[in-house]
């Protein structure tokens, strides 16, 4: 688990008893190599996603099924099946790696992320009609090694909506591969809990950093914390009433987690700053 995944689970420890896995895919049901995607997956672009049974060198007997893509210069995308409706604080976990080549069906050499390469995540709340930027993934890949990297993406809960995530890849040179495996979407609070507890709200979202935080059910004794997408705490301050104006304009453009805590009650909301 990477640092972000650990922080998210730590923030929501008080709610973890209500965690619910709503969708998983590890591609182990695919037979042979080069199988086309099924089960609601979608792709676009010239690279062409396929499911391969890859082995890790030097232990080529240790094979795993994974989606593999040779990104095109114009860009390609992999779109998950719909896994909504989600509850608040839902998370999409998966593994990924970038490789420059394969030897037969065996993973050979890693790809060092380079300027101009693109691996980004986008989220849709209308079954794929429109998408909004979620996170830049490229900087999370190591400069050496072929092991999978764990990703944990916060995806806001949208009751009654079918949520999809799109992974976009693009190369400027070479013929590196992007591979993905072990997808799991998890609700960290149940839908039933949402019906009995008013949800934390931030508006506008995305914003330039000036937002209205609405925290129904919380008092002035509550604590507000702001974390960046890597899980680093950026700010902490008391909640001055269940509605307060926040000026986060000094924070850099990106995705942040806003956590409100009072006693054992905790809620977390994702905020996109695009200043």
Image (tube, grey):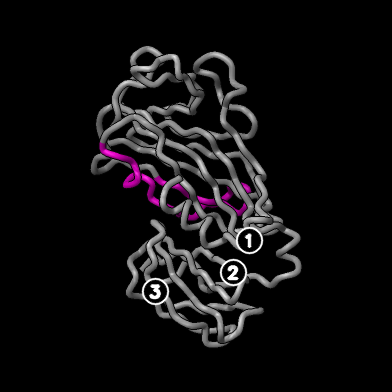
The mark closer to the camera, 1 or 3, is 1
Q: Quadrant of the C terminus?
A: bottom left
Determine which residue is flagged by label 1: 15
| 112 horizontally vs 11: left or right | left
> What residue is drawn where x is 37% and y is 69%?
234
> What residue is drawn where x is 36% and y is 36%?
74
Secondary structure category for the residue under label 3: strand
| 217 horizontally vs 213: left or right | right
Q: Is residue 231 magenta?
A: no
Lower position in the chain sequence, tag 1 or tag 3: 1
Marks 1 and 3, how far apart at CA: 22 Å
Residue 266 numbered mark, or none: 2
Secondary structure category for the residue under label 1: helix
Callout 2: few (<14), some (14-19), or many (20+) C-alpha neighbours within 10 Å?
Answer: some
Cβ–Cβ under 8 Å for marks 2 and 1: yes
Lower position in the chain sequence, tag 3 or tag 2: 3
Q: Give the range drawn in magenta.
A: 120-143
């Amino acid at each position: 688990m990477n640092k972000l995944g650990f922080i998210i689970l730590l923030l929501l420890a008080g709610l973890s008893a209500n965690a619910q896995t709503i969708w998983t895919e590890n591609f182990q049901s695919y037979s042979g190599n080069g199988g086309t995607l099924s089960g609601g997956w979608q792709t676009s672009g010239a690279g062409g996603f396929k499911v391969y049974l890859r082995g890790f060198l030097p232990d080529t007997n240790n094979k795993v099924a994974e989606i593999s893509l040779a990104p095109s210069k114009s860009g390609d995308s992999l779109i998950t099946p719909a896994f909504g409706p989600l509850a608040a604080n839902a998370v999409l976990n998966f593994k990924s790696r970038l490789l420059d080549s394969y030897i037969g069906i065996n993973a050979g050499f890693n790809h060092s992320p380079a300027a101009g390469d693109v691996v980004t995540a986008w989220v849709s709340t209308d079954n794929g009609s429109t998408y909004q930027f979620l996170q830049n993934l490229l900087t999370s890949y190591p400069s050496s090694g072929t092991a999978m990297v764990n990703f944990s993406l916060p995806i806001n809960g949208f009751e009654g909506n079918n949520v999809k995530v799109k992974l976009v890849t693009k190369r400027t040179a070479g013929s590196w591969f992007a591979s993905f495996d072990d997808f799991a979407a998890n609700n960290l609070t149940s839908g039933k809990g949402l019906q009995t507890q008013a949800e934390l709200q931030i508006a506008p979202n995305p914003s330039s950093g000036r937002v209205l935080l609405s925290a129904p059910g919380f008092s002035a004794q509550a604590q507000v914390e702001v974390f960046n997408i890597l899980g680093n705490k950026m700010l902490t301050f008391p909640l001055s009433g269940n509605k307060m104006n926040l000026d986060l304009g000094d924070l850099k453009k990106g995705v942040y987690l806003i956590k409100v805590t009072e006693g054992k009650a905790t809620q977390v909301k994702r905020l996109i700053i695009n200043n």
